[in-house]
Amino acid sequence: MPDPRFAAPSPHRPAEFDPPTRRPAVAVDDEIQQVPVEQRALVVRLSQEVAALRAALDLSRHRIATLEVEAAVDPVSGLFNRRAFEREVEKAAAFRSRYQTPAVGVLIAIDGLAGVAERHGQQVANRVLQTIGGRIKATLRSCDVAARIDPYQFALVLWNAAPADCQPRLDALRAAVGGMDSLLEGRVAAVSSRLAATAIEMGETPAGLIGRIEPMLGARRRGPRR
């Protein structure tokens, strides 16, 4: 007969998760039965109120967590917003200082969408932005962060990467945000993109990073006259 001390835990409920100090509900009922009859109803009511307060607290925590996520998301592109990007840059700079973890900041400027919004309405421009957001997200790893920081500009933080070794990922991003004219369904417009990247340095600030990358984007390319 096998020694019960070495028996395998149940596959349905591992032994290490069994709460050893949890008392069965019967014990609580027994304690209530020991309370004088005139006080028993009060004890039961207080127990119910405590349970209700705990449930309300759990619900409030869930709602706060949901609101925090929603507050960090850009509703048009589905990516993070500028504030979330700035927090990520600060985090990357801190990790660079403390752990020497490399990270790359990327800016993507979308040209031509302002004209699309003027000619065909903001709804059409938003549809292009939503598509761009989805394509950018599809190219990233789970650890990377992408955000829409201006009406027609996106920014990314690529973790554990250096400009010298992430060229294939930058090429994938260029390809992802290309071909937007097909979304305009024959409307007269020209949409193009510019992309630049650089390493996030120790002590980097979000404004400093953006200020360093923007000159690398180059001048806006003018489309042909139509």
Image (spheres, helix red, strand yellow):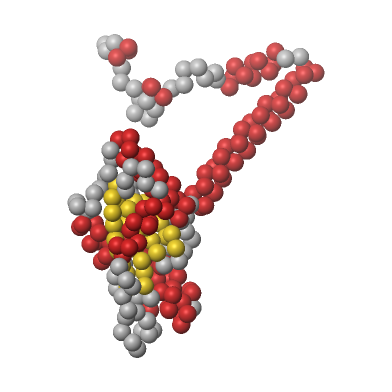
In this rendered view, identify the residue nearer to me: 184 or 54: 184
| Residue at x-position 47% and y-position 52% | 83
* Relative image position of residue 56 (x, y in whole percent): 62, 38
Quarter holding residue 182:
bottom left
Q: Is residue 25 above or below residue 140?
A: above
| Residue at x-position 29% and y-position 11% | 3
Q: Is residue 169 above or below residue 127?
A: above
Q: Is residue 183 visible?
A: no
| Residue at x-position 44% and y-position 63% | 150
Residue at the far right in the pictured view: 38
Quarter holding residue 224:
bottom left
In this rendered view, identify the residue nearer to me: 71 or 220: 220
Q: How many marks?
A: 0
Q: Quadrant of the C terminus?
A: bottom left
| Residue at x-position 38% and y-position 22% | 16
In this rendered view, identify the residue nearer to me: 42 or 33: 42
Quarter holding residue 110:
bottom left
* Relative image position of residue 86 (x, y in whole percent): 43, 50
* Relative image position of residue 65 (x, y in whole percent): 52, 44
Q: Is residue 218 visible?
A: yes
Q: Is residue 64 left or right of residue 182?
A: right
* Relative image position of residue 4 (x, y in whole percent): 32, 12
In this rendered view, identify the residue nearer to me: 128 or 158: 158
Q: Quadrant of the N terminus?
A: top left
Q: Is residue 175 left or right of residue 131?
A: left
